[in-house]
Image (cartoon, rainbow, N blue to C red):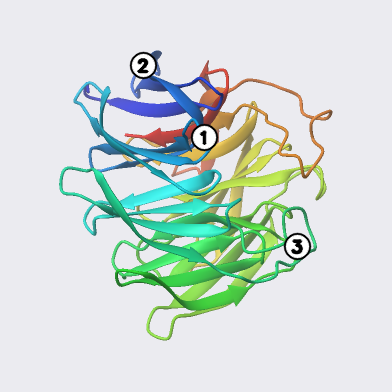
Amino acid sequence: MKEGERIVYVGERSRQGRLFTIHFNTKTYELKKECVETGMIYIASMAVEEGYLYTSSLDQEGRNLFCSYRIQKSGRISKINEWTDFGNDATHITADRKRGILIASDFLACTLMLYRLGDAGDIRCRVDAKRIDEEGSHVGPRQDAFHPHCTVIHKKERIALTADLGCDKIRLFGLDGRLRQLGEINLEKGAGIRHIVIHPRKNYVYAISEISSDIFVCMVDYQSFTLTLKQSFSNLQEKAVGESIGGDIVMSEDGAFLLASNRGENTIVLYRVMEDGLLKKVDFARSRGWVRKIMMDQKTGCVVAGIEAYLDVGAYGFSEKQEKKGEGIQIFHLNREQEKLVDLNVGIDVPGAYAFSIL
């Protein structure tokens, strides 16, 4: 990889899905696309972790298929191994190479799955599968039961936090060889908690809801395993609830700024993180489509928005309203001094784009 270059991995969600590398020069803003893998059935999620790429897709029988790849210096990948398991479609995966674990959140199978990673980056075995038999909120779409949409691993504490869209909860799990629930917080019924980000220094977590497009700020006590709601508000800038759904939430490496996206309204909102851990909105920018993934590069200030191909999610009825404006990635710049998110008018189309990760 050349100096100043970043590599974005983009997965096409189709029966004959392809995996692309997008070489992004942060100095010239040049973008170059290359197909590096084919035949990935309905790829749903990807995670880059310390020189390895992990993917979630389906096998020929429609079961979960998790693959591990070694990332070469050029950004190309070489497969290490794959692991087929039960389940329907893991919407989110996250890996921690130091602890040697990978966690998959299978939304439709209502299950969290914990895997052991080998020293060579391979997926060794599944060590736990956690299904919580709990009634959902039954307020919004897809809220009949426990539906884990996203799980994040704390870098220091042996803790993982899960966004439960079905029950409107953030759940806290201990990582002691098994997934053991230690605590939870009930948030607004019908919100549909989608994605979570952990502050790198403060005992705070931030969540975006899918159904209501709200932001929730919670303080976490990692000794008593309790979460306390400190702030909540709408992330929408223009449209009403029901005309847009929440997307992704991400924080800068230093914990100073937070970004959150709206799909339908097609905006990315910039917040400053205050000393007390609460958020203050400072700017927003328009995206050219549904931003499913936000990726930040603090060194250059570049923000890469992963714009998904619009797929009728079935529960919301957006299919006739959705105006397709492009699929792939769009580049912004975070001006920290002026606290502005600037659209660089740089992007590249990837038809069928759905899963994203950055090296």
Q: Nearer the N terminus, badge 3 or badge 1?
A: 1
Tag 3: amino acid: Gly
Left or right side of 357 for 228: right
Mark 2 closeness class: few <14, some 14–19, many ≥20 residues within 10 Å: few
Return the residue nearer the eye: 129 or 240. 129
Quadrant of image for the N terminus? top left
Residue 29 image position (x, y, % from top left) = 40, 18
The mark closer to the camera, 3 or 2, is 3
Query: Which residue is farthest left?
Result: 119
Spatial CA distance of label 3 from label 2 is 44 Å
Residue 3 image position (x, y, % from top left) = 21, 24
Q: Secondary structure at mark 3?
A: loop
Q: Mark 2 sits on what residue?
A: 28
Return the residue nearer the eye: 111 or 9. 111
Left or right side of 189 for 358: left
Residue 107 image position (x, y, % from top left) = 58, 52
Tag 2: amino acid: Thr
Q: Residue at x 47, y 65 (%)?
A: 130
Tag 1: amino acid: Glu
The vertical placement of 232 against 89, above or below, is below
Q: Residue at x 76, y 24 (%)?
A: 323
Q: Mark 3 sits on what residue?
A: 190
Q: Mark 1 sits on what residue?
A: 61
Q: Nearer the N terminus, badge 2 or badge 1?
A: 2
Q: Secondary structure at mark 2?
A: loop
> Is residue 33 in view?
yes
The mark closer to the camera, 3 or 1, is 1
Query: Which residue is farthest bottom?
Result: 224
